[in-house]
């Protein structure tokens, strides 16, 4: 199921595409929710390398800062990296956008049910469905997690706002930033409690 309805199974795994790991508030939200064990995140070295390249190219970080971020992510989620050899076994069979075949192959190799991405067009349903992988926009993904355990998700985002120091940000300010990519999720959070 691509963009609507509930997509989560009991033990849920998702590959996080570079497009959702690049924007700071979105990445932080996704990883804080994963820390609460509401889903298992997966990625590949190629996905992380793309994040580094984009952060450096856009001037958001120098190479050492970007690598430091990736090292922190991989240390926090030491089981998230899908091995290169596992991806290579599946990549040639993928029919989605050539630049993102490794992402779908990572999902297949890891047994993930979804690819969380802002680039849904690169993952047409007909390319993903034979492998039982759903391309999912982060708004749909996180809103579904919220529907399953609203308190845990709310607490994760509240903790995210409390942890922000440079610059400090209120929960409302953080929600304003997250609303750019996840408007439905933010609307649900604003009516929480």
Image (cartoon, rainbow, N blue to C red):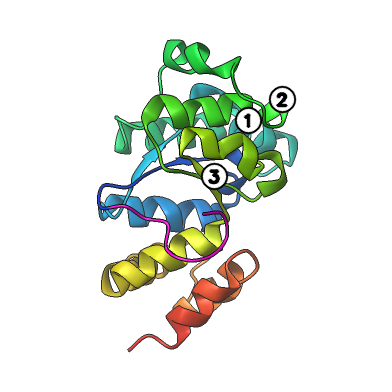
Which quadrant would residue 152 be assigned to in this image?
Answer: bottom left
The residue positioned 25% from the left and 52% from the top of the image is 10
193 shown above or below 102: below
Residue 45 located left or right of residue 152: right
Tell which circle, 1 or 2, labels the residue nearer the N-terminal end.
Answer: 1
Q: Which residue is mark 1?
A: 50
Tell us which disc is closer to us: 3 or 2: 2
Check disc 3: other Cα within 10 Å, few if <14, some if 14-19, many if 20+. many
180 shown above or below 85: below
In this rendered view, identify the residue nearer to me: 187 or 115.
Answer: 115
1 shown above or below 84: below
Instruction: Check disc 1 and report its element: helix, strand or loop.
Output: helix
Magenta region, residue range: 1-9
Residue 119 appearing in the image: no
Which quadrant would residue 42 be assigned to in this image?
Answer: top left
Check disc 2: other Cα within 10 Å, few if <14, some if 14-19, many if 20+. few
Find out whether residue 187 is within the magenta segment.
Answer: no
Image quadrant where one finds the C terminus: bottom left
What is the distance, in whole Å, between disc 3 and disc 1 at their CAs?
A: 10 Å
Residue 43: percent from left, percent from top: 46, 32
CB contact under 8 Å: marks 3 and 1: no
Q: Which residue is mark 3?
A: 21
Residue 53: percent from left, percent from top: 66, 30
Residue 5 appearing in the image: yes
Which of the numbered marks, if any, corresponds to residue 98?
2
What is the distance, in whole Å, between disc 1 and disc 2 at their CAs?
A: 15 Å
Find out whether residue 3 is within the magenta segment.
Answer: yes
**Number of marks in the rendered image:** 3
Instruction: Check disc 2 and report its element: helix, strand or loop.
Output: helix
126 shown above or below 162: above
The residue positioned 46% from the left and 80% from the top of the image is 188
């Amino acid at each position: 199921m691509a963009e609507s309805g509930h997509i989560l199974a009991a033990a849920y795994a998702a590959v996080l595409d570079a497009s959702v790991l690049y924007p700071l508030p979105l990445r932080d939200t996704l990883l804080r929710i994963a820390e609460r064990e509401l889903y298992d995140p997966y990625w590949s070295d190629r996905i992380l390398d793309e994040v580094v390249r984009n952060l450096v190219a856009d001037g958001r970080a120098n190479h050492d800062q970007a690598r430091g971020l990736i090292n922190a992510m991989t240390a926090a989620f030491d089981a998230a990296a899908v091995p290169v050899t596992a991806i290579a076994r599946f990549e040639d069979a993928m029919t989605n956008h050539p630049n993102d075949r490794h992402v779908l192959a990572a999902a297949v190799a890891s047994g993930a049910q979804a690819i969380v991405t802002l680039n849904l067009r690169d993952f047409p349903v007909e390319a993903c469905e034979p492998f039982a992988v759903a391309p999912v926009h982060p708004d749909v993904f996180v809103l579904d997690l919220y529907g399953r355990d609203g308190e845990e998700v709310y607490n994760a985002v509240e903790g995210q706002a409390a942890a922000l120091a440079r610059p400090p940000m209120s929960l409302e300010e953080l929600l304003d930033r997250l609303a750019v990519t996840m408007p439905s999720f933010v609307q649900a959070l604003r009516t929480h409690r």
